[in-house]
Amino acid sequence: PDNNAHVDPEWDGWPNGDFSCLFSLDFVETHENLRVHWACETLGGSANGSVQGETWQDGKVTRRKCRGIIECTSSTCAIIVRPQTRARGIQKQLSEACACGQPLLHQPCDVTSILHTFRDGVFYQNGGYHHHSRPTVRLHMSRKEKDQFTKIVQGNPGAGPLKLLVGQPGIEGPGDSVADITPLLLNSERIKYERRKILKDARAAAGANFAEEFTAFKEKYPNFICDAQFGNVTVIVMQTPFMAAKLVKSSVDGEAVNGIVSDAAHRVWMDHNSLLIVSSTFEPTRLRCWVPGLMSYSNGGTAEHYRIHFFYLFRGMARECAARDIEVADELFANVVDFSAAQRKGFILAFVDFWVEHAPGERTITELLDAAPKLIKGCAHHFRSQITRVKKISGVVDPSKTDIFENFARKLLSCKNIPEFNRHATEFIEAFPRAESWIRWWMLPAHACMLFPTFRVMTAELWDSIPETTNAEEAMHWKLYAAIGRRLPLLPGLKALFKFAEHYQRLFDATLTTHEDGVKIYYGPDPQRWKRVAARLGYTQHSRHRARKVSKNDGRPPDTGKALLGKRAKARANGKVAAKPTKALDESMQPMFNDLPSNHALRDLRQMVFTRVEVVTLAGYEPGGCTLLSQQRDGFRQSLVNMPRLKLTMQDFASMFGWLYHIIDIRGPQLTPGLERAISYFRTTSVILKSCKGSPENHWQLSKIKPRSEYQLHTELCERYSGDLRKWFQDLVRVNKPSDLAACWHAQDGHVFCEGSAVQHEVILNLPVMLIIEIGDMRASNWSIPGILSPYASNSAASAVGLKYSIVGHIYCHMGDKHFIARYLTVTGLKKKIFDYDGMKHEGHAVRNRTTKMRGALTGPSHLLEGIPNGYLLYAVVYHLDGGETAQKFFRREQVTQAAKLGLTF
């Protein structure tokens, strides 16, 4: 430069003075086209120049004019405002007062810099000195500041803006704040922007240059990538010579740690569909732990992906055998895998591919296909965890028989021969018929030969020498996550996997006696300390300790249900259905149905409901149907047909709930306490009290407590209650509602013995948990259907125990086709989902309704309900009692109390 005293060779953004300087193209790009911090307006330049000019005189000309500063007119105020670059913007700034209240003054500056941009760089001409202070507000970071910030972000990509601003946590507290780099980074929004830009640019650069970077990666680590193919099936196979050497053992270990364990990790890559397939082997001499033998990136989990992985596993082992003069035998390839069909098929196809390449013509394809399954062993832990899962499904396994179920299932693993296995499996299915499809899946030949010793095709010696689970590979996955992290981009992930593989070789080399830095890599005789713990205590992990009680902050008033409602809060929670509809079913239906006779139809109904609740998810219709539910439904229908008094066939048309009313119509000595309790789930009971004042002595008649007929509405009721279902229901349960009788009941054979006026009171003593209201003729009635139905208009104690009905669904009928369909509501947490069900469509599955609004779908005026198919009319509305049996007992006591106030005593 002509005057280098006025320009920083590192370009600090504050050029000042009368100088000229030629900057190279790299320098200009590094400093973002010589960006400055002065408040400059960009002016037009010459139209003749070009950025491709050979000299700076031929280059493109641009000019920057400094706009000075805006300062306060008060001599005691030091505020300096950065001016806008346009005259209109400056005038707007000047129209406003300073923060101290005084007027603002613009101090202009005439310094103009000229940039000549040409092929080799920029010739910069600065037009003089800035005789004003620097603006206190900077807009841009310098190159040095940006490099410092970039280094911190790249070193801590998981740190958010606030953590960067406060300082990275360390042993002695937070480290340096990024605000120490520049005051610009005191703004957390600016940190967020700059951080996101750095991370985004890094990922974009990795994607744009992946081919070149991947090639450079292979050249840097020439013995790591075995093969890489890209396309619909993308697989990158990785193995170091050390990994290949560990896959082939010179001797068989006495413990069941021989062979190979293979599984896929799902959370290594940023792409959620990509997997890391790992095959691990046990290193028995120095490390005494499982080490990775082959790793493969795959963009899916199909049989073709596993085929490539296993093929290179076999090929790598064969090459190692050749180098060590070991004969290649099938037993070397023995693997423990899970029960994925893709893994199994991929292994078999890879086995065939390998032997066709390695020893063509030695065996036929059929012989190879027959030999491959003899080398696969399934993970027994998967089976045991499935037992635990299924035994918790109360609709499949009675909660009182979970131990029996588990013992039955586990015994299948120890049967000595096939007849014994078949006999035991038959007994299992007879004891737990609803688990038949589950156990038969495990009994499929492809699965049974991998799991049950009775059906194994692998030799007994090989079976006993390899692990029985893939737990070792699951542990390897956790080591991977702990070592390299999760959700990694592809290329950084490959680099991390090389470091991970190198880690094991470094540990192995450190144990060699010839190693100059030989060290112990673990303490004690064996790094597998869990074995010693298990031998001494019988378990490897302590049970979870009881959570410590947390003291309540004394700065809070009583603000919880328990504090405000006391013991009643628990009863309310037990009956509440807001969390999940299946919870209400479990808490109300399960205990009430426990004491049913084993052959009663209501027990079959309970099992069918529980199976549907536990097995079917809330996702809606999925193609393929559900055989278990269809068979169970048809079996229940057949059991109804076989009932002696029902007199129906499978093809007959009957009312929607006629079968239910029939099976709960039980009276007299047949009504045991357990049966009465179960029937009360569906049945209303009442008592009739008649009184007459027609003689000197008033006389009364009290009927027995008996079931009340089902709730069937009609047009007259709709007119009486103006279509308000709430008013009808509250009047129904009201105790003080005497109705006149035509005459006294004292009469016989036409002879009347009392001329008095008689009245009767019907007192309802029990409400059902499942309330079914049949609407009647919908063409002549219009009812307002509420979401909540309460027997009492205002009763806080009743509300506390859940004495209110929540709507469950609708039944619709097409009288011409004689067919019923349904619409129902499910609630999970705060999310509501509405489903439509037609047993003749979608393979018997419910289909989720697009709307989530209750009004118009389930509540509101009945003639305005939306989405009902043509020809169908509303047949019935179904409600569920929130408080279950607890609410029933409260209602009974309340009704008796109300009756006593009127002089009615039972």
Image (cartoon, helix red, strand yellow):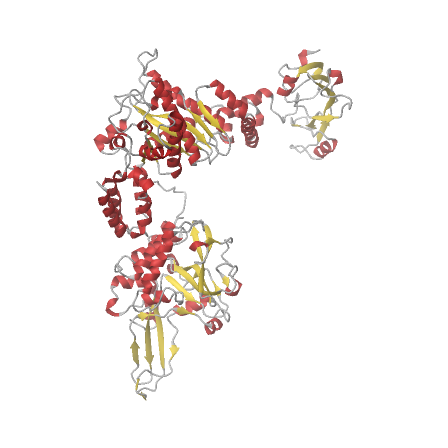
Determine the image quadrant of residue 38. top right
Total count of labels:
0
Q: Residue at x 31, y 62 (%)?
A: 639
Extreme residue toward the bottom, this view: 751
Asked if residue 869 is positioned above or below residue 464 in the image, the reply reads below
Viewer can see residue 575: no
- How far across and down, in percent of the image, does residue 668 sit? 25, 70
Q: Based on the displayed image, in which of its 4 quarters is residue 712 positioned?
A: bottom left
In the image, 623 versus 79, the foreground residue is 623
Residue 130: image location, x then y, percent = 71, 19
Which residue is at 28% across, 36% downward?
457
**Foreground: 798 or 219?**
219
Q: Quadrant of residue 497?
A: top left
What's the residue at 35%, 77% (across, down)? Answer: 760
Vertical placement of residue 705 versus 163, above or below? below
Give the quadrant of the C terminus.
bottom left
Does residue 67 appear left or right of residue 325 in this picture?
Answer: right
Q: Is residue 477 left or right of residue 419?
A: right
